[in-house]
Amino acid sequence: MTTQKTQYVEVPNDLKTKLLAISAIFIALSVSALLVYFCFYGLIDSFERLNRGSYYVEISAWDLPGLVGLPFLLSIGYGCTLLLFNRVTEKVRRLTLKIGVFFGVCFLVTRPFYGFWLSHYVESKGYHFCWYYSNVSMMTPNVYMNQPDLCYPVNPKNDILPWFDEQEAKGIVLTPDRVKAQAEKISEAYEAQFR
């Protein structure tokens, strides 16, 4: 009864709609690529540091949920691609919407459970949360130290982490006094820039 032409959902075919679809595809694919790179790399790096027994571990509770939410973005990109080429059928529109909503909800639900499990897992490996080296922004990773007495106030916070990497690469065993001296040195150099 219905022809091939009438199976497609009618969508506006003007330039504005096409530009919005192209923009949405570009944004969805760009964010997807960034998620895959940063979340996957962050996840692998964190667990590799844990297994190595590194001085510190940067743990992000957003890595795994970001990868779980990836199909949400890809379904948006797919739906917009169909829209761009005027190939949206009612069945595909519903399926794309269901996939997007399912993985969007999975992203939101996974985040608190994974964050709770991850912090307990890292602490069970003997690491301790370090407020002084962690940023307060919501999506930045938290820093855990393998020894709580290696955590000292420092400003800027992220300048001391590369120093820990250098010491670990050289095989130097760090003492609290040495870390405290380095933290003070970094803070003094930072404050001297603004005098």
Image: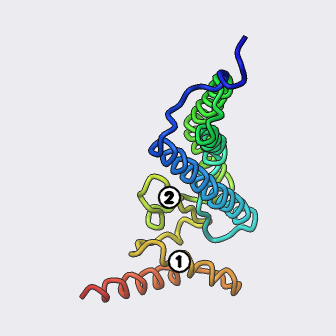
Q: How many marks?
A: 2
- The residue positioned farthest toward the left in the image shown: 195
Residue that badge 2 annotates? 140
**Identity of the residue furthest to the top in this view:** 1
What amino acid type is highlighted by mark number 2?
Answer: Thr
Q: Is residue 110 visible?
A: no
Q: Are marks 2 and 1 in contact (CB under 8 Å)?
A: no
SS class, disc 2: loop
Name the secondary structure under disc 1. helix
Residue at image position (39%, 75%) is 155
Q: Which image quadrant: the N terminus?
A: top right
Is residue 38 among the parts visible in the rendering?
Answer: yes
Task: Judge the density around disc 1: few (<14), some (14-19), many (≥20) Cα neighbours within 10 Å.
Answer: some
Please report the residue visible at 56 percent of the width from the left and 27 percent of the height from the top: 10
Q: Is residue 44 above or below residue 95?
A: below
Counting from the top left corner in percent of width and height, residue 121 is at 66, 49
| Mark 1: amino acid | Pro
* As drawn, 53 above or below 77: below
| Quadrant of residue 51 within the rendered picture | bottom right
**Mark 2: few, some, or many residues within 10 Å (few <14, many ≥20)?**
some
Q: What residue is at 48 percent from the left and 78 percent from the top? A: 159
Q: Earlier in the sequence, mark 2 or mark 1?
A: 2
The C terminus sits in image quarter: bottom left
Q: CA distance from mark 2 to mark 1?
A: 26 Å
What numbered label is drawn on residue 176? Answer: 1
